[in-house]
Amino acid sequence: MTRSVIIVNAKAGRGQCLARVGTLRSQLRDGERLIVTSDEASLAQAAADVVAAGAARVSLLGGDGTIATTLTALQRASPRAELPAEFVLLGGGTMNTVARGLGATGGPPEERLRRARAVPYGAGRPVRPLVVNGQLGFLLSTGLMHQFLVEYYAQGDPSSVGAARLLARGILSSLRRGPLARRLSARFTARLTLDGTPLPERDCLFVGVGTVPEVGLGFRPYARASPERGFHVVAYSGSIAALAFSLAAFARGRGEVVAGTFDRTGFRLTIEAQGAEPIPFALDGDLHPAAAALHVGLGPTIRIV
């Protein structure tokens, strides 16, 4: 009986995850299986195998993108759109923001797996992923937040140091009204509908949604998200210069005290573009094609070990 499966994204972490396969395979225990994926087809097959085996716990070796794409594949492979009950986030990717936000940090993947094996089934931290236009993830970014990721990848330094450097450049550029600030401050007009209630049309600098409190660099804009309260949505309509002076409030999850900010929790959200252009967005750090409307809901509760 396969009770636990380890899925390794061979392309994550610039090949570092693939280099750990031999060590992980040598440490497998009875009832455990290791699967290596390298593309959409192999991930779909891995998801089908996990569902067929009825595995209760899935360990993921890879970054934020690996987590999002694997959860999506697992739900699509399930006849009832269900997910395995528990997940172990082993890290190892270029971006590991989701794992850190859920407290899955400390030590190499082999050490994290060893600690997880000592945790009884059912004792992990409960969380519900977002479902955005059929894709699962934990952090939805649009507007400035999406463009920040575009700039982050373009600078060729995918690290926390690179992110901090870009943030500092962005703040300085906003004060000088420089070209970086102009790229980051591109706005879009949208109508939000939260839990069936339409909200006034707004000129957005960004709309962000999360079920993970932290987005990196100590920022916790989604601090009130929980399986009981739902996701935390923050929509900002002020200027980028005013935002630069209000970062401390957003970092503490207190966006509601900042002028021009909509800050609520909920379970169903639609973000509809009111202009001619669709809305570019990112989910867990992965950039997605722009869409005329983003339909945001919540997936089933899972536990992070």
Image (spheres, helix red, strand yellow):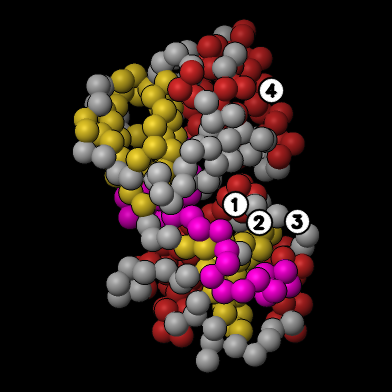
Confirm or deny contact between disc 4 and disc 1 (CB under 8 A).
no
**Residue 81, image x, y percentages:** 33, 68
Instruction: Determine whether, in the image, residue 228 is placed left or right of residue 5.
Output: left
Q: Mark 4 = which residue? A: 168
Q: Mark 1 = which residue? A: 102
Residue in view at x 36 percent, y 69 percent: 82
- Indicate which label's residue lies in the foreground, 4 or 1: 1
Spatial CA distance of label 2 from label 4 is 27 Å
Confirm or deny contact between disc 1 and disc 2 (CB under 8 A).
yes
In the rendered view, tell whether residue 126 sits above or below residue 293: below
Secondary-structure class at tag 4: helix
Q: Mark 3 = which residue? A: 106
In the rendered view, tell whether residue 152 sits above or below residue 268: above
Spatial CA distance of label 3 from label 4 is 27 Å
Question: Residue type at mark 1?
Answer: Leu
Looking at the image, tell me whether mark 2 or mark 4 is earlier in sequence order: 2
Spatial CA distance of label 4 from label 1 is 26 Å
**Residue 33, image x, y percentages:** 60, 83
Tell me if mark 1 has few (under 14), some (14-19) or many (20+) residues whose alpha carbon lies within 10 angstroms of its own: some
Query: Is 153 one of the magenta-colored residues?
Result: no
- Indicate which label's residue lies in the foreground, 3 or 4: 3
Looking at the image, tell me whether mark 3 or mark 4 is earlier in sequence order: 3
Q: Nearer the viewer, residue 177 or 167?
A: 167
Tell me if mark 3 has few (under 14), some (14-19) or many (20+) residues whose alpha carbon lies within 10 angstroms of its own: few
Query: Which region is colored magenta?
Result: 114-141
